[in-house]
Image (cartoon, rainbow, N blue to C red):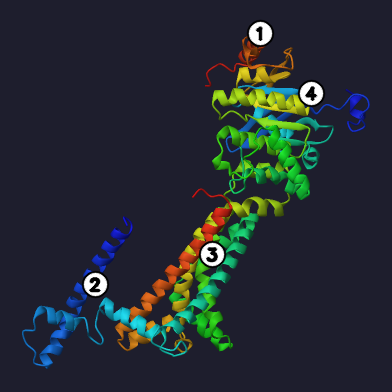
Amino acid sequence: MSVTSITSSTTGTGVALPVVKAEHLGLTFSTNDGDVVALSDVNLTIEKGDFVSFIGPSGCGKTTFLRTIADLEQPTSGTLEINGQTPENARKDRAYGYVFQAPALYPWRTIEKNIALPLEIMGHSAQQQAERIKRTMDLVNLSGFEKKFPWQLSGGMQQRASIARALAFDADLLLMDEPFGALDEIVRDHLNSELLKLWDRTKKTICFVTHSIPEAVYLSTKIVVMSPRPGRVTDIIESNLPRERPLDIRETPEFLAIAARVRDGLRAGHSYEEVV
Amino acid sequence: MNRVLPILTILFAILAFWYAAAIWMNAPWQNILNGRANLENVPFLEFAQQTWAQDKPVLPAPHQVAAEIWNATMGLEFTSRRSLALHAWITLSATLLGFVFGTALGVVLAVAIIHNDATDRSLMPWIIASQTIPILAIAPMVVVGLGAVGLTGLVPKALISMYLSFFPVVVGMVKGLRSPEAIQLDLMRTYDANPWQVFWKLRWPAALPMLFASMKVGIAISLIGAVVAELSNAAGGGLGVRLLTGSYNGQTIQIWAALFIAAGLAAVLVAMVGAAEKIVNARIGVRA
């Protein structure tokens, strides 16, 4: 790792910097009821092109960790580097696109104008905007809905639009916080397989927060199992599933073995015990 | 049709009640008049018509008010001092100017309040206190005071309108500009948007529905402010002056005519804000 830290990722030679590198990362919220430890001693390296899922019960700090990568929360101990930079500088570099739990589309903007929002803010020309809107809307299969307002679309389509918005400015890192958590299982299956295809085509690095074991195993190259009180990593599982994953891969023994290991990791972290 | 019928029914009920009330309230004076004229045992229908045709009735009948409105607007030159159209225009111009001032002041204050905790704490109590002072007490001081330094006519009245109309705009816009959800603000942060962009691309559009709601209240009380301000300066004209002179001279028909013009004016102004709201809503895709 000491070698990679002096090699710039932009030179294109040698080993690329890890996209995310957390060492002994901790985050403690001060509240009126005293301190709440949201993250404790998290060590994790995410390489370029990884699809990493964070799984765990609520309160395990998976969303907090994602928000820390995005510089929406500040760690209180340890170090965190995004592309070798501080999270703040990475955010200012527009290094990542963030997909929230809810679509968070602006209701007064049409779908294409919502996708244009980051482009407007980042100062792209009108022509570039039009190009990128078309490309990303194709990518998430929303062509034809450019002039619709968000409320005219279903929940799944709205979330696809929010993914298109996160893709529009070509950040290499995509942070997704339970993006399909509010959708029904059929829509979710469909979007999961579309997301895999999109990841394969765009070669992006994806960090994906979920509390669904099948979703995590189906999508990921690497699964980070977390547990609560305090939020910490209990297991990191490298998936040996092929990149090409049809939906029925979820019935194969390999798939079920990984799912069982995830469940074991959750159990080891006392995630299944009653909260007292 | 099924919308017109209920409206007409209510209208007829009000008119019937009004005519009946006019008979009852004008009867004592009519009895005195008939007594002086040695008229006895007047049939009820004739008596009713007498009570609906007095010069200075306690309660004028609807058709008397309607006739007065017609005569005082269409029947007179616009420049006549007795023209209600002229007085309505005087009041309207002060109302509109005060409304524009008030809305601008309200928006500016709201922007200052949401961007700075110190302004929030220091300004908000004064803004609320300003509305607890009876406008009837403030208006003469402002109008007479400004008159003493040579500022007369439109501006002092507009200032009173502004004093009333900025309040709903401040309160509404503070709420509106603070209405974006945490997640929508977080999104802006992930784009490293500057405060200017956050304001124009998020806070302002999010606040538009509140802006129109508060402008509807604002323009109506703007009219009240202009009328009240006119009470302090009889020479300046306006609907307030017509109300005042009407009450000095017992010209109840004139008072009611001015009242109805003022009410009609307020309705038209609120409807105009509503129409503007509809146009904006259509552009920002609000569900019809």
Q: Select label 1 or label 4 by which is in front.
A: 1
In the picture, the quarter occupied by the N terminus of chain B is bottom left
Structural distance between the alpha carbons of marks 2 and 3: 41 Å
* Residue A178 horizontal/vertical position (percent): 62, 29
* Mark 3 lies on residue: B127
Q: Is mark 4 on a helix, strand or loop?
A: strand
Structural distance between the alpha carbons of marks 1 and 4: 24 Å
Structural distance between the alpha carbons of marks 4 and 3: 54 Å
The numbered mark, 1 or 4, whose residue comes first in the sequence reads 4
* Mark 4 lies on residue: A45
Q: Select label 4 or label 3 by which is in front.
A: 4
Report the chain holding disc 4: A
- Name the amino acid, label 3: Ile
* Mark 1 lies on residue: A257
* Mark 2 lies on residue: B18
Structural distance between the alpha carbons of marks 1 and 3: 66 Å
The numbered mark, 2 or 3, whose residue comes first in the sequence reads 2
